[in-house]
Image (spheres, grey):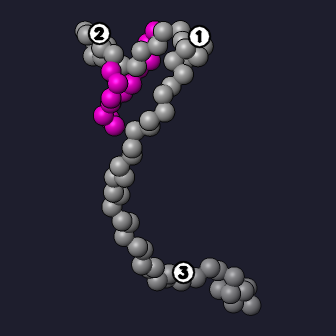
């Protein structure tokens, strides 16, 4: 009786059939139009001081100010 009880209570592996998964669609770049709204430069200057956006420079170079960046650039905020 104990053996039959153990056999009844023991979990039995049941193979789960693999479910097909959808192949993800390759992402496509969506062009983004640059904003035509002029920033409130005076408000920004009062709040943050004189701020310049620049790419993070290498170890032995300075960061020149920039207005356009590549999507992989590291952007630094200096003042």
Q: Nearer the viewer, mark 3 or mark 2?
A: 2
For disc 1, the neighbor class at 10 Å (few under 14, some 14 to 19, many from 20) is few
Specify start and end residues of the magenta stretch as a single range.
66-79
Which of the two discs, 2 and 1, labels the residue nearer the N terminus? 1
Q: What's the residue at 32%, 30% (across, down)?
A: 69
Q: Which residue is mark 2?
A: 62
List the residue tagged with mark 1: 46
Distance from Cα at disc 2 to Cα at disc 1: 25 Å
Q: Secondary structure at mark 1?
A: helix
Circle 3 residue: 13
Report the number of numbered marks. 3
Answer whether residue 3 is visible to the viewer in this image: no
Question: Residue 22 appears at what percent x and percent y?
Answer: 40, 73
* Proximity of marks 2 and 1: CB atoms separated by less than 8 Å: no
Give the camera-side residue of 68 and 58. 68
Q: Secondary structure at mark 2?
A: loop
Badge 3 density bin: few <14, some 14–19, many ≥20, Cα 10 Å: few
Q: Quadrant of residue 57?
A: top left
How far apart, in angstroms, are the residues tagged by discs 3 and 2?
A: 64 Å
């Amino acid at each position: 009786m104990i053996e039959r009880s153990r056999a009844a209570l023991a979990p039995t592996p049941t193979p789960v059939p693999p479910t097909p998964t959808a192949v993800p669609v390759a992402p496509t770049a969506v062009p983004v139009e640059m904003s035509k709204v002029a920033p409130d430069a005076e408000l920004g200057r009062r709040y943050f001081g004189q701020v310049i956006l620049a790419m993070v420079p290498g170890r032995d170079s300075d960061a020149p100010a920039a207005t356009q960046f590549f999507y992989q650039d590291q952007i630094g905020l200096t003042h």
